[in-house]
Image (cartoon, grey):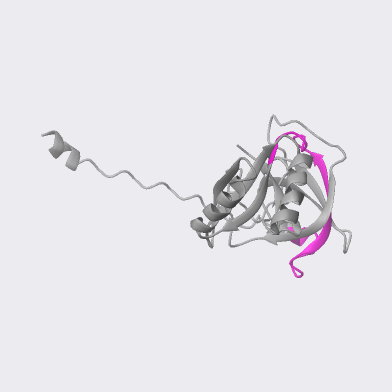
Amino acid sequence: MLSGCASRRPAPNPPTPAPVPQPLPPGQQPTVRPPQGSSVYSGQYTEQGTASWYGAQFNGRRTSDGEIYNMFQYTAAHRTLPFGAVVQVTNLNNGKQVEVRINDRGPFVGNRIIDLSYSAAVAIGMIGTGTAPVRLDVIAGPNPNIGFFAVQVGAFQLEQNATRLREQLTARYSPVTITTLDLPNGVFYRVRVGRFPSQSAAQALATEIQDQDAVVAFVVRLDN
């Protein structure tokens, strides 16, 4: 009798997918606001390097902080700045500036320091070039010097390659962990070394690993 009732129970509805963000109405500007309740930090954090941007392929997917990526808002991905940090980005080729909020992690290319949303890239005139030299100035949000940091030494689409590198490094470093990243082109297995209370300590290890193991290593913030 119980099994008969269960067989007639309707199947649960599948979860409703999040709507894909659409272009803003004419005249409406993107907004940049730190999360409610966050501390406000406006200090001497500056950084120079290469910016890139990401757009339609990621539009509507979840960012690293859990919100839905909207290519029409002023947001960005950074490897070490805390979520909610507001950053003024200056294109050093033309002097154009835009303020963005950090809500994602990346770019995972060694010579780039920030991935801008499509609209932010348009604002500083770098859509056509794809990349641009920029200066970053943190103007609001949580203190970027507080947190924990690690060194990323590889990202692989084959899990066994990540496992092999972890075993190679475990003999000299601890901890060595593997985390996954789901991207439109597949799942990546990221190998990370250490857990440090300062970015400078993590950077010292990154330099050591690059010199001794001839691999590309860069510092990342640990968000959990």
Residue lying farthest to the left in this orientation: 1
Question: Left or right: 9 with respect to 62?
Answer: left
Q: Does 35 appear above or below 16? A: above
Residue lying farthest to the bottom in this orientation: 128
Q: Residue at x 22, y 40 (%)?
A: 9
Q: Does 109 appear above or below 139? A: below
Question: Left or right: 52 with respect to 180?
Answer: right
Question: Left or right: 119 with respect to 182?
Answer: right
Residue 173 visible: yes
Residue in front for this viewpoint, 80 or 20: 80
Residue 182 visible: no
Query: x, y (%) of residue 172?
Result: 64, 45
Image quarter (top left, top right, bottom left or bottom right) of the C terminus: top right
Image quarter (top left, top right, bottom left or bottom right) of the N terminus: top left
Question: Left or right: 47 with respect to 219?
Answer: right
Residue in front for this viewpoint, 97 or 21: 97
* Residue 108 falls in image quadrant: bottom right
Q: Residue at x 41, y 46 (%)?
A: 15
Q: Residue at x 61, y 49 (%)?
A: 169
Query: x, y (%) of residue 7?
Result: 18, 42
Query: x, y (%) of residue 94?
Result: 88, 63
Query: x, y (%) of residue 17?
Result: 46, 50
- Asked whether residue 141 is drawn in magenta, I would say yes
Instruction: Report the magenta residues as a range.
Output: 121-149
- Asked whether residue 126 is drawn in magenta, I would say yes
**Circle count:** 0
Residue in front for this viewpoint, 98 or 135: 135
